Amino acid sequence: MKPYALIFLPYLIIKKKWTPLAAGFGCIAAALIAPAVFYGFQGNFTVLKEWHSTLSRSTPPLLSTLDNISILAFFTKWTDDPDFSLICSAALISLMSILVLILILKGRELQRPEVLECGLCLTVIPLVSPLGWDYTLLSSTLGIMLLIRYFTVFAKFWRIFLVVNFAVIALAFYDLLGKELYTLFMKWSVTTVNFLVLSGYLAYLRIKKIC
C-alpha cells in the first residue's frame, strides 16, 4: 500500500467533512481486511505483521538514496546521523503542521478555500513521507498551477526568485546535468528545498487571503 493520502484524514477532521472522512476510513479498513479473502483472518494478520517488519527493515537504508527527497532523507543526507535526523525532521514537520492549521483557519471566510489547502497538502505529501521519491512530486501540480495563476501578486524580487526556483526544478535531470553534477545535486537534496520554497509561496497566498 502507498498510504500517501492519509495526510488528508486530519484535514477532513478539521474541515468537519464527515462523509469523505468515513469513506477514507472505510477504504483503509477494506485495504487491511481484503487479503483475508486469500489468506484467512489469521493469515492476513501474519501478512500485515510481515509488511510492517519488511517496511521497518527496508526504510532506513533508503533514506540516503539519491532519489528520496523527503525531509527525513534531507536531514539524513546532510547529518549522516539517523537519530538526529529523525529529531530534526519531526520538529520541522510539526512546525509545518502547525502552519497548515493556521492557514486553514485563516481561510474560513474565503470562497473555495479547499483549492489552495488541497494544493498545499498534495505538494508536501512527498516531503513528509519518509520515502518520498522525486517522481511523486507530480502531486504538486495543483499547487504549481495556483502559483502560476497568481504569479503577478508577488513582488518583483519574489517573482524572479520563483522563476529561478521553477528553472532549477525543471532543469534538474540526469541527461542535462550529467552523472557527477546530478549525483551532487540530489545528494544535497536541492529538490527538497525547492518544494519547501513552493510551499512557502502557497502559504503567502493564504496569509494575504488571495485564495
Image (cartoon, rainbow, N blue to C red):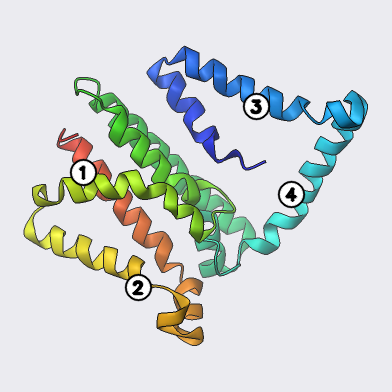
Q: Which of label 2 and label 1 is nearer to you?
A: 2
User: CA gap, disc 3 to disc 4?
Assistant: 18 Å
Q: Which mark is residue 204?
A: 1
Which percent across, then down, holds residue 199? 32, 48
Residue type, numbered disc 2: Leu
Tag 2's secondary structure?
Answer: helix
Residue type, numbered disc 4: Leu
Q: Which of label 3 and label 4 is nearer to you?
A: 3
What quarter of the picture does the C terminus occupy?
Answer: top left
Q: Is residue 144 visible?
A: yes
Decide: few, some or many residues near mark 1? Use Cα within 10 Å; few <14, some 14-19, many ≥20.
some
Q: Is residue 70 visible?
A: no
Upstream in sequence: badge 2 or badge 1 = 2
What residue sits right under mark 2 in the picture?
Answer: 171
Tag 4's secondary structure?
Answer: helix
Residue type, numbered disc 3: Ile
What residue sits right under mark 3 in the picture?
Answer: 28
